[in-house]
Image (tube, rainbow, N blue to C red):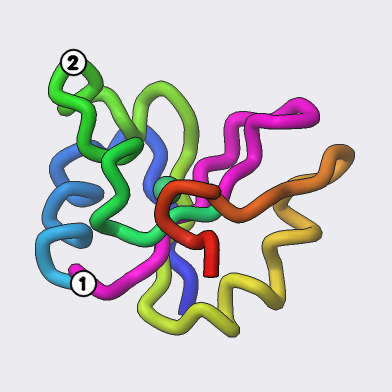
Amino acid sequence: MVIKFENKEHEYEEWCNMYTNGYVFNRAGGRTGNVLHSVGCWHLNVPSRKGTYSTRYPKYCTENLNDLLAVVGELSKPDSWRKCSACLNK
Ligand SMILES: [Zn+2]
């Protein structure tokens, strides 16, 4: 299951606190903006951005990476996506 959080900051934060081993896809668009992260990534925990993560760009969250990988190409159109080099570089 993949859950979309857009302008739902409280729900997004609750989800991240609940699924600390989950994954977050940041759908910022463009050639470099669509990035898959793990929940604990520092990119998702920048203090100055806290409270605005789901309002800046929609977030697609899942506990099952395969569920997200199945739709991430479609979600990224017309652009592509990448894995975050900081948290998913294995
Ligand atoms: Zn990351």
- For the record, the magenta segment spans 20-35
Residue closest to the eye, 7 or 89:
89
Which residue is located at x 53 percent, y 70 percent? 90
Under circle 1, the secondary element is: loop
x and y, in percent, of residue 47 in the image:
14, 23
> Residue 44, located in which quarter of the rendered image?
top left
Q: Nearer the viewer, mark 1 or mark 2?
A: 2
Q: Which residue is mark 1?
A: 19
Along the polypeptide, which appears first: circle 1 or circle 2? 1
In the picture, measured across the screen, residue 19 lies left or right of residue 85, that is: left
Which residue is located at x 19 percent, y 50 percent? 11
The amino acid type of the residue labelled 1 equals Tyr
Q: Which residue is mark 2?
A: 48
Marks 1 and 2 sit apart, C-alpha to C-alpha, by 22 Å
Where 44 falls versus 32 (above or below)?
below
The amino acid type of the residue labelled 2 equals Ser
x and y, in percent, of residue 17 in the image:
11, 61
x and y, in percent, of residue 62 in the image:
41, 71
Which residue is located at x 70 percent, y 31 percent? 32
In the picture, measured across the screen, residue 82 lies left or right of residue 84, that is: right
x and y, in percent, of residue 18 in the image:
12, 69
